Amino acid sequence: MTLPDFFLIAGGVSAFAVAFGMGANNVSNAIGTSVGSGAMSIRVGLILAGIFEFLGTTLMGGMVTATLKSYIISPIHFQDQEELFVLGMFSTMVVALIWILIATHYGLPISATQTIIGGIVGFALVERKFDYLNHRTLATIVISWFLSPVLGAIFSYLLYYSIYRLILEKGECSRFIVPAYYGATFTILIGFTLQSNLVTLGLSYNLLYVCLSVIFLVVSLGTLWLRPTAVLQTPLGIGTYKDDLDDVENSGRDFETRKEVTLNGSAKMYVRQVANPNGPPSPKKVWKEKSIDPQKEANEAPFKFLMMISAAFVAFAHGSNDVSNAAGPYAAIVEYYQNGKISTDGSIPISVIVGCGIGIVLGLFILGYKTLETVGEKITKLTFTKGFAAQLSGATTILFASAMSLPISTTAILIGGIVGVGVVGDDSGTSGVDKQVLLKIVSGWVLTVVVGLLGTPLVYVVIQFLLT
């Protein structure tokens, strides 16, 4: 069976559309916690995430893409039947695209990775090639789906717990502790990036460790030396406390705030509703009063900038892992039309990765706000410290998986991190987490695998029928 050129064009459109859908659905992974805590506006977050999503895609996206293209089921088992492999990969993208668009429409964060991998297994079953699946790689990936969000939650719990014990519980912010968090953030995240490109950069592991030590010292001492009021003493805005005020549902563009500080050091925030968030402007003035601890503001403030940094690295990590969902299947299609066969060495055309990276960024800018509220605000109330802990733990876990060439669910990891910080400081241990929202999201993950596993064989069989 010879495939028409239609599948090369349709495959490219599908890959770009899948990338667009991932950008629309998964933008919350990168900036949801930052926006939810009030560290940045949606506009700034989208621009920051767009830049670093693309950088992660182009600099580290090839490793995980190779796994989806060649290492779950090798093209070598389709010798003289490469057309079937191409149709299978095309079918996975079609099903993933439909499911991503449905989930985005309903504001449900899902994992495109699980749809794609479920689809690959599904078409392998239809072709009775289950024995040809790389069971070891597949088992490792499935285990990582369960393990990675747990690790993200544990890491975020420990990180936030350290902040809570060292800073928040003591009621004072040591001038030496915050620079250490800055140094650790840059060291961890730059370290994973360098480790994944050791061969390209010509670095040995010993030299890598030296570089990371220097980075930690330079960033920590530099932050300690600069320590400007703008960085370490920035006053908090309404974002941190808006969830505690009954009538406050949107950001400062809908509400006017005023603070008064008395002589004894206590503070109060007044919020005047100047517009109805769900309708036309209302002249009614509604004032709410909320007591604010000035020291708490001072302790939380240094982590506002850290949240922005960690959000950028989360976007980088997300791009490095999730671009594979679109680029992996399409890379196999491109190779078939270029060479008449599909290589087994995991080589990926850079043009495919760049094109899919552009698709992710465009989807992020155009439709990314749809799932932003679910991840950013509905799971648990976020402050700058909680948001920073969730993001740093998520980025570290994702970059570790990318360095191991494992396609994992970045959504699951980030939400696991948010759950982890939501547990700290709560008497019951779980009441800080909205379990109904969490259950909705987990249900979406389970359904995602089923959609890929059952939907791809259906599309695959229909396409074969139309070609005969």
Image: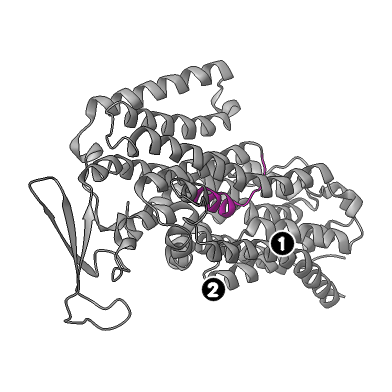
User: Crowding near pointer 1: few (<14 within 10 Å), some, many (20+)?
Assistant: many
Q: Is residue 463 left or right of residue 324?
A: right
Q: How does the figure colour the protein chain or chains?
A: one colour
Of residues 54 and 121, which is closer to you in this image? 121
- Quadrant in which the C terminus appears: bottom right
The main secondary structure of the magenta stretch is helix
Percent x, y of residue 313: 45, 43
* Amino acid type assigned to the residue bearing label 1 in the image: Val
Instruction: Report the disc number at residue 13.
Output: none
Percent x, y of residue 364: 46, 61
Instruction: Report the disc number at residue 449.
Output: 1
Q: Which residues are magenta?
A: 405-418
Of residues 53 and 223, which is closer to you in this image? 223
Percent x, y of residue 443: 64, 65
| Residue marked by disc 2 | 106
Q: Is residue 174 magenta?
A: no
Q: Residue at x 78, y 48 (%)?
A: 72
Q: Tell me if residue 192 comes above or below residue 51 in the rendering.
A: above
Helix, strand or loop at label 2? It is: loop
Percent x, y of residue 355: 55, 55
Q: Residue at x 52, y 58 (%)?
A: 26
Of residues 328 and 419, which is closer to you in this image? 419
User: Crowding near pointer 2: few (<14 within 10 Å), some, many (20+)?
Assistant: few
What's the CA distance linking mark 1 and mark 2?
18 Å
Q: Is residue 266 left or right of residue 68?
A: left
Q: Tell me if residue 129 comes above or below residue 219 in the rendering.
A: below
Q: Which of the 4 image quadrants contains residue 255?
A: bottom left
Q: Residue at x 16, y 52 (%)?
A: 267
